[in-house]
Amino acid sequence: MPSAALLDQPQEQLSLDKLASGSDDGRPGGDDAALTELLTSIRRHLHRHPEVGMQEHDTSRFLRETLERYGLDVHGPVAETGFWVDIGGTTSSANGRPPRVGYRADIDALPMQDAKSVSYHSRADGVAHLCGHDAHSAVGVGVALLLHARREQLPSGGGVRVFFQPNEESVPSGAPMMIDDGVLDGLDTVYAIHVDPTLEIGRYGLKTGPITASSDRFDITVRGRGSGHSARPHEAVDAVWIANQVMQALYQLAGRITDPRHAAVLTLCRLEGGQAHNVIPPEASFGGTLRTVKEKDRNFLREKMQRVAEETAALYGGTAELDLMTGAPPVVNDAEAVAAARRAIEAHFGPEAVYDIPKTSMGAEDFAYYLREVPGALLRVGTQSGPETRFPLHDGRFDIDEHALAPTARLMADLLEARLGDGG
């Protein structure tokens, strides 16, 4: 009897030969009914059963068992709920030791409510796949199966490592844990994708250099002196008012003491202080994120935030404590890795399928940690085809057109195989 984790999959296991046979009409990247059915089933199972970072135990088990059913050997767990599979080649290589290429899929969901009315609606209250990691995982399975089916064509000594990473969304995130557990050992280049609801299905976004920003989270606690009556604020040290002064000062930093031509944004998203309408509380706190593209600006602003908070609070008789949580650095795509991706996209879908991303996103992605160690690239995958698939990431209504899954898996499998042949 199959495990409960596998019950959402098609009852009949598809053969590797059928999955690897290509599209029904013979075109690379065209509609592939068998692969689409499998990957859609995987994605919908994950969408129904989401788990937040470092709690992806059932998610990991489901993905591992799926791959093992097709004969792949799983290495793990690593980073608690992560794992990887290695697909090695058997053919001789004329270029000495061929490279080893990596592919990352993230598996965690968000602590948010699913607001969609679909058959695969999240069954977990307050947890949902609203950033596309269910799609990333399904594509990762597809990449692994396609390469496993053609493993005898891959060069001996080289190969591909497909790894499934927990906890991309939180700080600290899962990528450094995966690196510590050896996921990059022996790899020469690494790739990942991210779904993009602003791009139409069939288009792929590329950018050399920084494609996302860094992201640091912070909390600031402001303390006054005891409590006070709202009728006599001069007799208190007003923590709420001081917090407001600190907030206004912080908002002046990006673009005033940093070069306004350098993308940097400090955003405050949380504010707490007091419970009564007529009592000045002794303490107030707020928090948000700092995002930059240049590491110099990041370090400079972090130091200034500390000084602004402490000195502004001291000016009015209070104190301020900054708790800064270092998040992911910018994702910086390698030029050759992007060029190879462009060649693969154009070979599959034609040059019109490539979208050259003009500006760096101020969002963040912990795939950046891998690219600090080895060259590689993050690709954007178009997943919108109408109103229901245009909602932004981290929106309760977010969804994708699942017809993007199979072509993307085939594209990435072919790209990784090509990198083995061209030296990484």
Image: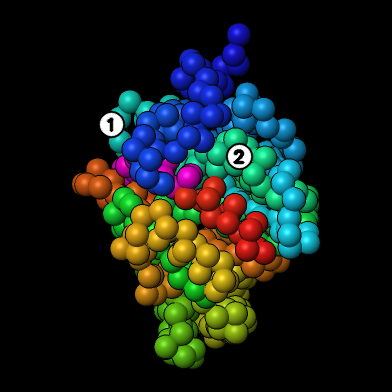
The residue that appears at 58% across and 53% down in the rendered structure is 416
144 and 292: which one is in front?
144
The image shows residue 417, relative to residue 253, as above or below, that is above
Horizontally, residue 132 falls left or right of residue 101, namely left
> Residue 73, percent across and down?
72, 33
Q: Quadrant of residue 221?
A: bottom right
Reply yes or no: does residue 398 show up in magenta: yes
Q: Secondary structure at mark 2?
A: loop
The residue that appears at 51% across and 35% down in the rendered structure is 20
The image shows residue 424, relative to residue 118, as above or below, that is below
The image shows residue 262, relative to residue 196, as above or below, that is below
Residue 43 visible to the viewer? no
> Residue 67, percent across and down?
62, 31
Q: Tag 2: residue type?
A: Arg
Residue 360 visible to the viewer? yes
For disc 1, the neighbor class at 10 Å (few under 14, some 14 to 19, many from 20) is: few
Reply yes or no: does residue 208 show up in magenta: no
Q: State the residue position of label 2.
A: 150
Marks 2/1: CA–CA distance: 39 Å
Question: Which circle's residue, 2 or 1, is located before the other in the chain?
Answer: 1
Q: State the residue position of label 1.
A: 117
41 and 153: which one is in front?
153
For disc 2, the neighbor class at 10 Å (few under 14, some 14 to 19, many from 20) is: some
Q: Quadrant of the N terminus?
A: top right
Q: Quadrant of the C terminus?
A: bottom right
Magenta stretch: helix, strand or loop mostly: helix
State which region is magenta. Answer: 397-410
The residue that appears at 24% across and 43% down in the rendered structure is 388
236 and 399: which one is in front?
399
Horizontally, residue 106 falls left or right of residue 84, namely left
The residue that appears at 44% across and 33% down in the rendered structure is 35
